[in-house]
Each structure stands twice: as C-alpha cells, then as structure tokens.
Image (cartoon, grey):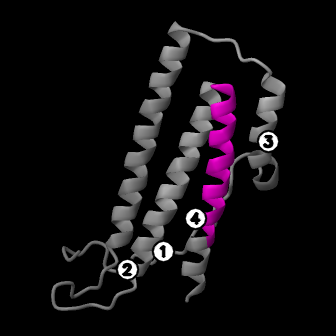
Amino acid sequence: MSTTIRLAIASIFVGALVLGIKTLAWWLTGAVALLADALESTVNVATAIAALIAIRVAARPADASHPYGHHKAELFSAVLEGVMIIVAALLILREAYLGFLAPRVLDMPIERLLVNGLATVPFGKSPKFVQLPIKMHHSTSTAC
C-alpha cells in the first residue's frame, strides 16, 4: 500500500472522529455554529473518501478507452468537494435563518461547548488533513 493511500485512509479515520465529536457538540447544544462546524467536518470526511477513490482510480494504467490514463478521476473528486461545500453552505444558511426567526437560549452552554473543545484542541482550530500529492498528467485531454 502506497504512502498516499495510507495518508488518505488516515485522513478518513481522523475526520470521522472529529465529525463524531462535533456532531455530539451540536446535538447537545443545538447551536447553529456547531452545526456549521459539523457540516464542514462532513465535507472533510466525504471528500477524503472521494480522494481515496480518485487516487486509486487515477493509479490505473492507460488502456484502450483511456489512452492517457485515468488521471481525470482526481478532477471529479475536486468538483465533488466544491459541490459539497456549496450544499453545506446552503444548509448552514437555512439553519441560521431559522435560528434568527426563532432564537433559542442555550442551556448549560459552557459544559456542552467543552465537547466541541475535544475536537478543537487536539487538531487545532480545524483539523488539518494532509494534502495528498496529486499528479495531473494529461488533464487537458478528452479521455477520462
């Protein structure tokens, strides 16, 4: 197993752990800010999975139907990430609007926000996923 694939798998597991903690913090508090944090972590996990798949597909050798290889799989992964960020932004906007229309008081916010701190302290402000090296050979070709 290559280092790149091992890093992609590790990124998925770390992202899932952070997602679980941030989702728990949102569930306990109902705070829209924590929902936004959890949605961002959801995007991180989903795109890490897409990156792993793209890396494996892009590593396939050229064949008759893909004479320049399968490197465009990495581009599809990047497009998926962009779409997911837009969807997450729209969901956050919706929740913020609903929260503005019907605000609610957070009970015991300090204790419950400490749960979010579990995800924040070990990884910094936001988990820094290892940026995987991507080779974009022949990305302008018409082969996919």
Q: Which amino acid does the dot numbered 1 rest on?
A: Ile
> Between disc 4 and disc 3, whose residue precedes?
4
65 and 47: which one is in front?
A: 47
Image spot of residue 37 (x, y percent): 62, 39
- Give the residue number, with chain letter if any, for mark 3: 117
The residue under the point 63% across, 25% down is 30
Viewer-nearest of labels 4 and 1? Answer: 4
Q: Which of marks 1 and 2 is nearer the N terminus?
A: 2
Figure quadrant of the N terminus: bottom right
CB under 8 Å between discs 1 and 2: yes
Of the numbered discs in the image, which one, if any, rests on residue 58?
A: 2
How crowded is the residue under tag 2: few (<14 C-alpha within 10 Å), some, or many (20+)?
many
Name the one closer to the observer, 127 or 134. Answer: 127
Q: What element carries label 3?
A: helix
Q: Residues within 10 Å of mark 1 (few under 14, many from 20)?
A: some
Sooner in the amino-acid sequence: mark 4 or mark 2: 4
Q: How far apart are labels 4 and 1 at the CA level?
A: 17 Å
Badge 3: few (under 14), some or many (20 or more) residues near its Cα, within 10 Å?
Answer: some
Does residue 138 appear left or right of residue 29 in this picture? left
| Residue 110 spot, x, y in % from top left | 83, 26
Residue type at mark 2? Ala
Q: What residue is rendered at 41% in x and 49% in y?
A: 82
Mark identifier at residue 12: 4
- Residue type, label 4: Ile
What amino acid is found at the position of numbered circle 3 in the picture?
Gly
Helix, strand or loop: magenta stretch: helix
Name the quarter where the C terminus is drawn. bottom left
Q: Residue at x 40, y 85 (%)?
A: 59
* Secondary structure at numbered mark 2: helix
Classify mark 4: residues with Cα within 10 Å, few (<14), some (14-19) or many (20+).
many
Mark linked to residue 134:
1
